[in-house]
């Protein structure tokens, strides 16, 4: 694994993650395909990777008053609950099945973005 490719994957993941565009997808794909790391390990690395990025991004978005805390707090609470459930469920799944589920999710999200008309927010 080349340090250059590792650095580029990390940089791109950080940029996309801070923009809220799913940098984890890039990092997980890079780790599982190009480094032969199992899907569950790649997801664990991804979660650790995004702790500092998430903190920094919240600070930057809050400075610009782009966070509506009244809406965000319930999502955060249920997100934490969901993370416990997801962590428990992922331990029961085989890495091959986890990879296939991740691929299906990416395909669904990609198709939705490609075929959904965008709304102008002017």
Image (cartoon, helix red, strand yellow):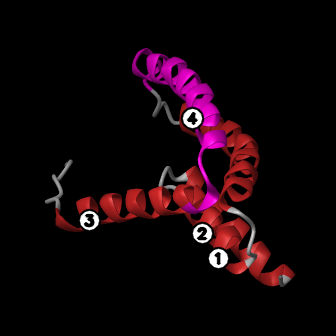
Q: Which residue is mark 4?
A: 86
Circle 4 Cα neighbour tier, 10 Å, few/some/many (<14 / 14–19 / ≥20): few
Instruction: Count the marks.
Output: 4
Which of the 4 quarters of the picture holds residue 71?
Answer: top left
Which quadrant is the N terminus positioned in?
bottom right
Q: Upstream in the sequence, badge 2 or badge 3? A: 2
Q: Upstream in the sequence, badge 3 or badge 1? A: 1
Whether 78 is among the magenta residues is yes
Q: Which residue is mark 3?
A: 111
Q: Nearer the viewer, mark 3 or mark 4?
A: 4
Q: Which residue is mark 2?
A: 29
Which of the 4 quarters of the picture holds residue 8?
Answer: bottom right
2 is higher (above) or lower (below) than 29: below
Q: Which residues are magenta?
A: 68-96
Q: Residue at x 45, y 23 (%)?
A: 75
Q: Which residue is mark 1?
A: 33
Q: Upstream in the sequence, badge 2 or badge 4? A: 2
Circle 2 Cα neighbour tier, 10 Å, few/some/many (<14 / 14–19 / ≥20): some
Q: Position of residue 78 (x, y in %)?
A: 49, 20
Q: Upstream in the sequence, badge 3 or badge 4? A: 4
User: How much space separates mark 2 and mark 4, taking CA atoms?
Assistant: 19 Å
């Amino acid at each position: 694994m080349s340090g250059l490719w590792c650095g580029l994957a990390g940089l791109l993941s950080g940029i996309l993650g801070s923009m809220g565009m799913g940098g984890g997808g890039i990092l997980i794909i890079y780790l599982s395909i190009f480094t032969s790391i199992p899907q569950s390990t790649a997801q664990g690395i991804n979660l650790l990777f995004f702790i500092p990025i998430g903190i920094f991004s919240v600070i930057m978005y809050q400075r610009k008053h782009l966070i509506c805390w009244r809406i965000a707090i319930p999502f955060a609470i249920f997100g934490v609950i969901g993370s416990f459930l997801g962590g428990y469920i992922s331990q029961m799944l085989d890495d091959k099945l986890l990879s296939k589920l991740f691929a299906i999710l990416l395909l669904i999200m990609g198709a939705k973005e490609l075929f959904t008309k965008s709304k102008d927010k002017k």
